Image (cartoon, grey):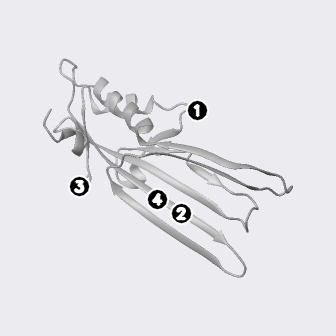
Amino acid sequence: MKLFDWLTGYKPAPNGVDRQSTTALRNDLLAINRKTAPFIIRDGKPEGVDLVAEWKIVDARWYELFAQAGLQRVFKVLMKFDAANCEVRAVDQEWSVEWRAGVPALTLSTNAFRGRKWEKSFEMAFAFKDDLSYGKVYEYQFNTTEIKTPLIEAAHRTGWGWRGVAFGKL
């Protein structure tokens, strides 16, 4: 392991593990899917990659409160299989969209990110509800390692390395 591998996101294939086919790699990554997981792994053809791991619970909606305000956050790991180098090349993407409906205007703000991301955050909001009671409106947690660690482990089980891509071609 080189000095800056932790920074670049490179995790070489483990020694002593036989490299399996791209089909076996794909199947092992898709086998991570389960109903209780906070993410889903799906086909990546629409994005031009092999697979996409997508956070599915970082979605907090405010219903009929403060003029239909809501916040939506999307986090994805795009994966492409590099058979020549026996690596899964991965890039992180994140979008955050905030909607505010007011009188008389509707505004939209958005931001996006592409590269390698480490984040652990949580949020909880309290407000007055429709029935005029005060309480928790939503709560969520977000941890990028929760989605990436099982992906890297699956790649390593099949004898493949993992390379995070920040600026280059996926």
Front-most of residues 25 and 118: 118
Residue to which mark 1 is pinned: 35
Which residue type carries mark 2? Answer: Val
Residue 17 is situated, as x and y percent measured from the top left of the image, at 22, 19
Front disc: 3 or 4: 4
Of mark 3 and mark 4, the one earlier in the sequence is: 4
Q: Is residue 113 left or right of residue 127?
A: left
Under circle 3, the secondary element is loop
Alpha carbons under labels 1 and 3: distance apart: 32 Å
- What crowding class fits label 3: few (fewer than 14 Cα within 10 Å), some (14-19), or many (20 or more)? few
Of mark 3 and mark 2, the one earlier in the sequence is: 2
Q: Which residue is drawn at 50% across and 60% down?
A: 96
Which residue type carries mark 3? Answer: Lys
Q: Which residue is drawn at 44% across and 36% down?
A: 146
Front disc: 1 or 4: 4
Which residue type carries mark 4? Answer: Trp
Q: Residue at the far right: name it.
A: 131
Residue 64 is situated, as x and y percent measured from the top left of the image, at 76, 61
Residue to which mark 2 is pinned: 97
Front-most of residues 116 and 130: 130
Residue to which mark 3 is pinned: 169
Alpha carbons under labels 2 and 1: distance apart: 25 Å
Q: Residue at the far left: name it.
A: 2
- The reply to whether the C-beta atoms of the residues labelled 1 and 3 are less than 8 Å apart is no
Under circle 1, the secondary element is loop
Residue to which mark 4 is pinned: 95
